Image: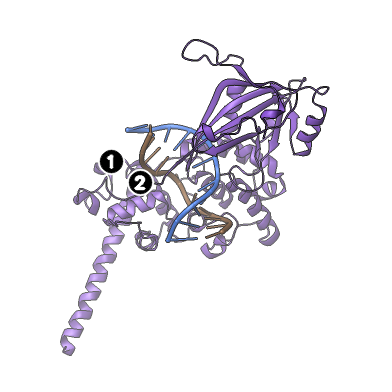
Chain colours: A purple, B blue, C brown
Amino acid sequence: MTILSDENSVVKNDEKDNEENEKRAALSSALLSWYDQFGRDLPWRVRGAHPSPYTVWISEIMLQQTTVKTVIPYFYRFLEKFPDIETLANADIEDVLLMWQGLGYYTRARKLHECAQYLVKNHGGKFPETYSELLKLPGIGPYTAASISSLAFDKREAVVDGNVIRVISRLYGIQESTAISLPDVTKKAQNLMSDTRAADYTSAIMDLGATVCTPKNPVCNSCPFETDCAALSLHLIEEIPKIEKLQKINKIGKLFWIENESKEVLIRKRSEKGLLHGLTEFPWEAVEGDRSKLREIPFPIENTDWIETGKSVRHVFTHINLTLEIYQTKINSMKNESDLMNLKKSGGQFVSKKDFENYPFSTLMKKVIREADSDDQKVSKNGKKSKKIVSKTLSQFE
DNA sequence: AAAGCGGGGAG
DNA sequence: CTCCCAGCTTT
């Protein structure tokens, strides 16, 4: 190679870099113009100003794996009850869970509480501004660290979530046969980010993914990237990004609705580990597979009739399809004295129905309450009521 | 790197 | 029904 050609090569690369930079700047500018005109107005968003990090934080945590529409009422209620970091830090975790009930992924609420206490203890009750400091906080991962840093503090930190992965992988025509490379997407998203309007860029790319570059039926003729989108020109919009789907398992189980003579119902607290940990529930047991694997009545109470109500509740988790058949019984303090003692010893307690509102139930248990608490019995196909007594003695217990 | 973790609404 | 939404933590 001659010196001349080396110089040419360098010049060529510079020109190429300049072209790339201009291209990115043009895309970024187009995105921001689109946002100025079509961006959404959201409760946690302040046009022309930056929301507080607390506001951003609460909304971002709530929005994880759920939808804007679902979050909005929770957001208002939560901020009214816990208006700032210190109030949240001093709150009882049970009250935080109560505000969270029905929103799912309850670890988020626990980490929220934990993080507030951490901030009070270690950061003077204020949020740090940098990505790396934010990343150290409980419950805050790469996405939320970037979102707080950019939205509240206008730092140039690119968020990467499902929306961004979709927009970026389509724009650049990333069509991996396996999983999308997160570092690759992050780098491209970071490059695309505006130098001057970091916060607005974050809002803009999220809005684009949510309203235009949607998973199904994207509105490409309204997209600021229409003429630049690789996936669109390749006719691969519906194929990108490629998502692998996971296998679901079916579970069947029984749930036991036990009332005492005061019409109070037995509840208990779930263990602190695993699914729905720490939430309130009625006793239930489920197994994988079909109902032949179920134990008759795994809940040992003497001298009582268990009633198969014919009612059942079906609930779908991310990775489990669950069906619970509801069994009922009534016990009283005279006939079931030792049972009552055992139930209390194992963590059960009787609570009146109107006090249910003071306990954090999952949506699954709320379904149970709606079903079990209705007086009408389910009528089976042959017109007969399916309610029947299924067990009378302890001999059928294990 | 993979699995676990909720709930809801759109199509 | 299926898909997937402003992800994080644990193993």
Direction bottom: furthest residue: A2
Direction top: furthest residue: A383
Quadrant assignment, res A27: bottom left
Q: CA distance from mark 1 to mark 2?
A: 10 Å
Task: Tell whether label 2 touches label 1 (CB within 8 Å).
Answer: no
Closer to the camera in the image, A326 or A133: A326
N-term-proximal mark, 1 vs 2: 2
Residue at the image position 52 percent from the left and 11 percent from the top: A384
| Secondary-structure class at tag 2 | helix
User: Does residue A173 appear left or right of residue C5 in this picture?
Assistant: left
Which residue matches tag 2?
A: A208
Residue A200 in picture, x, y percent from top left? 42, 52
Closer to the camera in the image, A64 or A309: A309
Residue at the image position 40 percent from the left and 49 percent from the top: A162
User: Does residue A271 appear left or right of residue A68 in this picture?
Assistant: right
Up-down: is A389 above or below A138? Answer: above
- Which quarter of the image is occupied by the N terminus of chain A? bottom left
Up-down: is A239 above or below A305? Answer: below
- Mark 1: give few (<14), some (14-19) or many (20+) Cα within 10 Å: few
| Secondary-structure class at tag 1 | loop
Instruction: Kindly identify the amino acid type of the residue bearing the numbered disc 1.
Output: Val
- Mark 2: give few (<14), some (14-19) or many (20+) Cα within 10 Å: many
Residue A131 in picture, x, y percent from top left? 51, 62
Q: Chain of mark 2?
A: A
Residue at the image position 55 percent from the left and 38 percent from the top: A287
Instruction: Kindly identify the amino acid type of the residue bearing the numbered disc 2.
Output: Leu
Closer to the camera in the image, A281 or A114: A281
- Which quarter of the image is occupied by the C terminus of chain A? top right
Point out which mark residue A219 bears.
Answer: 1
Q: Chain of mark 1?
A: A
Residue A233 in picture, x, y percent from top left? 19, 51
**Camera sees residue A229:** no
